[in-house]
Image (cartoon, helix red, strand yellow):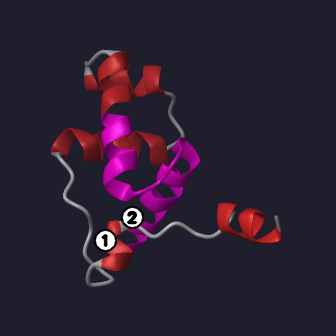
Amino acid sequence: MEATVRDAYRPLRTPADTAAGTRSPELTPTQIKVLRGVHSGLLNKQIAYDLGIAEATVKAHMTALMRKLNVRNRTQVAIVAQTLVLRTA
């Protein structure tokens, strides 16, 4: 059981980590805008309003972001967004 708990909390590696160490995953312009919204702490509904798209479309972009960033939830997306912001700053 101890190994299971330890595995559940190990840090997830992003494609950026596994590639060259500094390379960001390929994101579409809209996915980048959604990522910025998540990084700012906005809700899906707020991101949708700001971008002029449906909330369901934001959810679809979030699913794609989670897949591309190799993370499991919105909090992890926000953490990766912070890392990407620091790399580009």
Spot occupied by residue 49 in the image (x, y as percentages of width and height): 35, 19
The image's mark for residue 85 is 2
* Figure check: 4 above or below 65: below
Q: Quadrant of residue 24?
A: bottom left
Q: Which residues are magenta?
A: 61-89
Spot occupied by residue 84 in the image (x, y as percentages of width and height): 38, 66
Q: Residue furthest front?
A: 1
* Figure check: 4 above or below 48: below
> Which residue, given by chain and number where applicable, does mark 1 sit on?
88
Going 69% across and 64% down the picture, which residue do you hit?
A: 9
Q: Residue furthest right?
A: 2
Which secondary structure lies at badge 1? Answer: helix
Q: Quadrant of residue 16?
A: bottom left
Give the amino acid type for the residue marked by disc 2 in the picture: Val
* Figure check: 39 above or below 56: below
Q: Quadrant of residue 57?
A: top left
For the residues marked 1 and 2, what is the alpha-carbon distance in whole angstroms? 5 Å
Q: Are marks 1 and 2 in contact (CB under 8 Å)?
A: yes
| Number of dots carrying numbers | 2
What secondary structure do most residues of the magenta stretch adopt?
Answer: helix
Which secondary structure lies at badge 2? Answer: helix
Confirm whether the magenta stretch covers residue 83: yes
